[in-house]
Image (cartoon, rainbow, N blue to C red):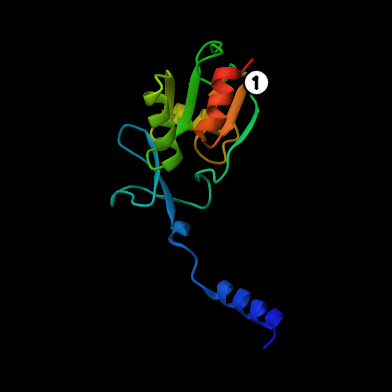
Amino acid sequence: MTFKNLIVCLLGLALLLPVSSSSGELYKWVDDRGNIHYGDKPPQKAELEKITGIISSFKSVNVEPFKYDPALTTIGSRSKSKTVIMYSTSWCGYCKKARKHFKRNNIPYREHDIEKSKKAALDYKRLNGRGVPVILIGKRRMNGFNATTFNKIYYHHS
C-alpha cells in the first residue's frame, strides 16, 4: 500500500468515527415566572421546543465595531465607554473564564444570562448573537473570550 492510499484510508476511517457528544439535543422552555431557559436537561413537566444549533460557545474570538442601539434594553441609557456588558449562559466555559478574569482584575461588568432573562434573550437576538459570550466594551464587540484580546480592547480602546 502506498503512502497516498494509507492517508486516504485513514481519512475514510476518521469519517466513520462517531460524532462527539457535543451534538446533543437542546431544548427551550418557559418556567412558572415566565423566564426562558435553554438546556439539554429540561424539567419533566415543561412544554418543550426542540432547538437545533441556536446557542453555542465561540471556538475562536473575533472583535468587531459595536454601535450603540437604544433598543437594547439590558444596556440602559447610553453606555459608558468603560462599561463591560456580557451576554452569557451558565454552562459556557468561556463565560466562566471571562467572569473569573473580570473579578481577578477588578473589572466592573454587567452580565445578562440569555437563558434566564427574556430581556437578555431579546437583546442577544437583536445583536444577532450566534454564540456566547458576547462582550460589549465601549464601541467594540467581542464574540468569545480571550484574556489577552480583552485586555487590549479594555485598556487601550478609544
Crowd band around label 1 with a 10 angstrom C-alpha radius: few (<14), some (14–19), many (20+): few
Among all residues in the image, which is located at the extreme bottom?
Answer: 1
Q: Secondary structure at mark 1?
A: loop
**Total numbered labels placed on residues in the image:** 1
Q: Quadrant of the N terminus?
A: bottom right
Compared across the picture, whether 158 is left or right of 99 comes to: right
Depth check: give the residue in front, 42 or 127. Answer: 127
Q: Is residue 117 visible?
A: no
Say which of 35 and 111 sits in front.
Answer: 111
Residue shown at the point (49%, 35%) measured from the top left: 133
Is 104 on the left or on the right of 123, as rendered? left
Depth check: give the residue in front, 96 or 35: 96
Please report the residue visible at 42 percent of the width from the left and 42 percent of the height from the top.
93
The vertical placement of 60 against 17, above or below, is above
Q: Amino acid at mark 1?
A: Lys
What residue is disc 1 on? 67
* Residue 143 shown left or right of residue 109 in the figure: right
Q: Is residue 57 in view? A: yes
